[in-house]
Image (cartoon, grey):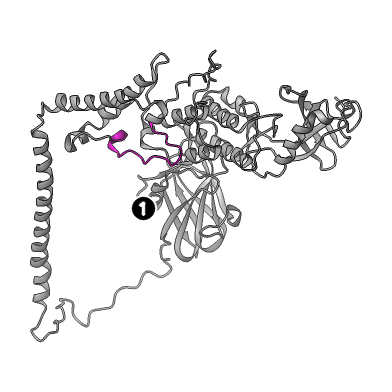
Amino acid sequence: MTSTVTGLPDRYRPIDEVGPEEATATGVIRCWRARDRVLNRDVAIRVHIPGGPAARAWIGRALTAGGLATPALAMVYDAAEGSGDAAAPGGAAYVVNEWIEGRTLAERLAEGPIPEREVRTVLRRLAEGVAEAHRVGLAVGGIGPDTVVLRPNGLVGLRAVPAASGTMQGDIAALGELLEYCLTGRQSDAPAADGRPPRPLLVAQPDLAALVRRARSTEPGAGLSSAAAMAALLAAPPRPSQSMHLIRDPEESDSGWLRRLRERREEDDVDDVDAGGPQRLGVGGLPPAPAYRDDDLRLDAAFGDEDEDDDAFDEALDDRRDDGFGETTDGERPARRRLVMIGLPLIALVVVVLLAWWFGTNVLSVADGTDDGSGTSAPPSSSVPQDSAPAEEPPTGELPAATIASSTLFNPQDSDPENDGDVPLTHDGDTGTAWSTVTYSSSPDFSGLKDGVGIVYDLGGDQALAAVTITTNTPGASMEVRVGGGPGADLAEWTVGASGTVDGSTELAFDEPVTTRYLLVWVTSLAETEGGFSADIAEVALRPAG
């Protein structure tokens, strides 16, 4: 295929045709991977045949997209309406996009569903890019598994921006379909004959099932308000109810599945219900998470708020209390509540009295015993002679131990948590406790989502160091020891002082002693573990220089 055949300027040399043809109301769009001879880089070039006025609307949309700068959408480098003569150089209408390297989502999903955490990250970043286009009034269009690319650096990108046509609501629905496809590994059926949207597949996570349903809904007032709202919901920390996985029978009604979800929730909370009366608690006895502003993803909002389901839930809750703990009459329930309300304050009062008695007996009596009656306290007696020898000096040549004052997770390329609360376990003196990354399913390079994750250690002041010893329970992970940065510094501001593969307890020594207050242990590659790839740090020990 030559540029003269496609009607392109000589600057662009087509290499391979990629993707299927895109039929439009005004013609056909075909896409090539091409070489920009001027800037010496690969680009994606899409050609609309015929050019001229037939492609004017598409070129206008491309010019709008040219003002966007987001990694989630392929940048628009060039666009021309052409003369309409596809055989003449410069006669075809074309849009030149950034060429995005990586695997398409369709290629990744051919291996099976993607883990929930990765799905949240990928769809959130894509939704943020679509929201940016919507902000300038541009409907992106063309969002599908064949056009979404997982970049090698962990980001996500959409090729072929913009499509020949599209709507903002269509973009949101396409994001919902992608979310469902990533979680289940299957695409849903076609819409029903009466025009209703297809029935969602079996998404195990209740909040994500609700998000899919709202994103694809065409009912007034029931759909998702914006792509930005979808991105915000995917970025929110997982709610407690997400730990409950309940598979739905394809033949089961919405109200039936909702009732089973509530019964499962009731079984987990039956002990709490007995202590305080009927309560609507979350999974595991936790209070329900607060409703999201503007886009409430409660189960009732997702599957219909039916009075009969609420009544059945309350009746089932009362029945379980009666069956599990003996029959309770209506008169006994208020009495039990009064007993709890009166008993708890009495117990608290007894505790306060006992503490006051202990304080007066032990603390005040010691203070009275040291008063000589003149308002001054006598110096405490000592059995050590005044002329005793001074304390022994430490042995000559022995260096004081290097210490770690505090530690903080360093995860600049990912907004999701990575077991942040376990970071102090890496310097608690106990190799039996450890901080660990989450498990990544695809590959040791964090499934391509980011370059690494690490921990910043504050030594409390400048210390001269010769080496750092790292102890791990996941032999085979690769790590770096970096210096030169500080709180809030970018990864590029940290200099690699030592690196290597950590196996059990491994010392990473600096070529020359370094003096630093802040130290970064940066995990660059994971070890293969049960269920995927991960790494942990059980203990970090510092060897002083000298």
| Disc 1 secondary structure class | loop
Predominant secondary structure in magenta? loop
Question: Dot 1: few (<14), some (14–19), or many (≥20) neighbours within 10 Å?
Answer: some
Residue that sits furthest to the right in the current view: 88
- Tell me which amino acid carries mark 1: Asp
Please tell me in which quadrant of the rendered image residue 190 appears: top right
Q: Is residue 449 rendered to the left or right of residue 28? A: left
Q: Position of residue 91 (x, y in %)?
A: 88, 31
The front one of 268 and 279 is 279
Please tell me in which quadrant of the rendered image residue 49 appears: top right
Residue that sits furthest to the bottom in the current view: 374
Question: Up-down: is 63 above or below 185?
Answer: below
Q: Position of residue 366 (x, y in %)?
A: 11, 72
The front one of 195 and 394 is 195
Q: Is residue 110 rendered to the left or right of residue 4? A: left
Question: Up-down: is 468 above or below 524?
Answer: below
Question: Up-down: is 393 above or below 88?
Answer: below
Judge whether residue 426 is colored magenta.
Answer: no
The front one of 371 and 483 is 371
Q: Please give the residue where the numbered disc 1 appears in the rendered image.
A: 428
| Residue beneath the point at 54% across and 44% down | 452
Judge whether residue 290 is colored magenta.
Answer: yes
Q: Quadrant of the N terminus?
A: top right
Residue 14 at least partly seen: no
Question: For the magenta stretch, what is the residue range?
Answer: 281-299
Q: Position of residue 243 (x, y in %)?
A: 37, 32
Q: Is residue 260 rendered to the left or right of residue 163? A: left
| Residue beneath the point at 37% across and 47% down | 431
| Residue beneath the point at 36% across and 27% down | 305
Q: Position of residue 393 (x, y in %)?
A: 35, 73
